[in-house]
Amino acid sequence: MNHDRPERRQGSSVLRGDLVPDSTYDQRLLDRKGPTDWLHMDPWRVLRIQSEFVEGFGSLANLPAAVTVFGSARTPRDSAEYELGVRVGHALAKVGYAVITGGGPGVMEAANKGALEADGVSVGLGIELPHEQRLNEYVDLGVEFRYFFVRKTMFVKYSSGFIALPGGFGTLDELFEALTLVQTHKVTSFPVILMGSEFWAPLVDWVRTTLAKTGKISPSDVDLLRVTDDPDEAVQIILEADRHRTGA
């Protein structure tokens, strides 16, 4: 082994041989000229991620109890699903919950609209996407994120439960992430409610007859999904979970 290889310590890391850079971090920092590749390197991304967590926590820390509503961004404004989203947001706001959505159009806009019209707190947590998607006009408090996993943390941390209206991959992603957290007891007293029984019936049936029947999940895990078409019933489910959590 060659013991004459150059070596440099950088914080907790040790670099040897060809991995030793030609300059130090502070040299590159103070150099007024040079490449901007550092903006896209993993160590810098860590700081960006940290800053997103700090900004998210700081922006949302003073929210009242809240519920996150998911659903398709493609839902037309003149549809029954949009109207259901408005009713859900309105019902939640009327009992004092802030309404959190992804901040986009469709069902998200509908829930924010319902909350705003009921004089509630309407929150949108947006995400940077390849195609521009602005926060909808009914958002009182909006936070934009670069990273999905930071945004997901905010959805869970500041919510008393999830309500999922008909949606696509994004809705399913959030739905099964929430179910996994509840199943593994990472979050407790956290209801997951599906609204739109006709839309969700095939999925619930598959969970019951395929996942549970073949032992991929426990039979009791099926009960983690609550299905209703009534916004008031959805609100009551969340209120009961909150009372159970607080012992009230």
Image: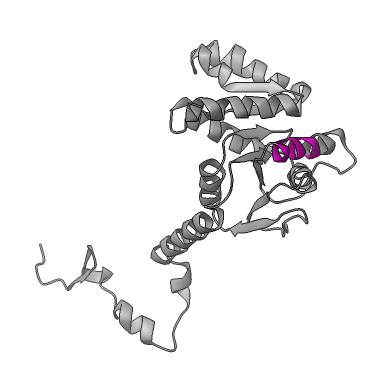
Residue at the (52%, 18%) spot, across then down: 221
Q: Quadrant of residue 128?
A: bottom right
The dominant secondary structure in magenta is helix
Q: Position of residue 137 (x, y in %)?
A: 78, 56
Magenta stretch encompasses residue 84: no
The quadrant of the picture occupied by the N terminus is bottom left
**Magenta span covers which residues?**
86-94
Residue 128 visible in rendering: no
In the image, taking residue 16 as reference, residue 23 lies left or right, namely right
Which one is nearer the viewer's eye here, 35 or 229?
229
Asked whether residue 38 is in view, the answer is: yes
What's the residue at 49%, 18% (across, down)?
Answer: 217
Figure quadrant of residue 172: top right
Left or right for 237, reference 167:
left
Above or below, 99 against 15 in this view is above
Indicate the position of residue 214 as horizontal and vertical percent values: 52, 12
Q: Is residue 34 above or below residue 189?
A: below
Q: Which image quadrant is residue 191 in?
A: top right
Residue at the extreme front of the image, as rendered: 248
Where is residue 201? Give x, y as percent. 72, 19
Of all residues shown, which one is farthest toward the right? Answer: 78
Q: Residue at x 77, y 44 (%)?
A: 118
Q: Is residue 119 above or below residue 85?
A: below
Residue in view at x 51 percent, y 51 percent: 150
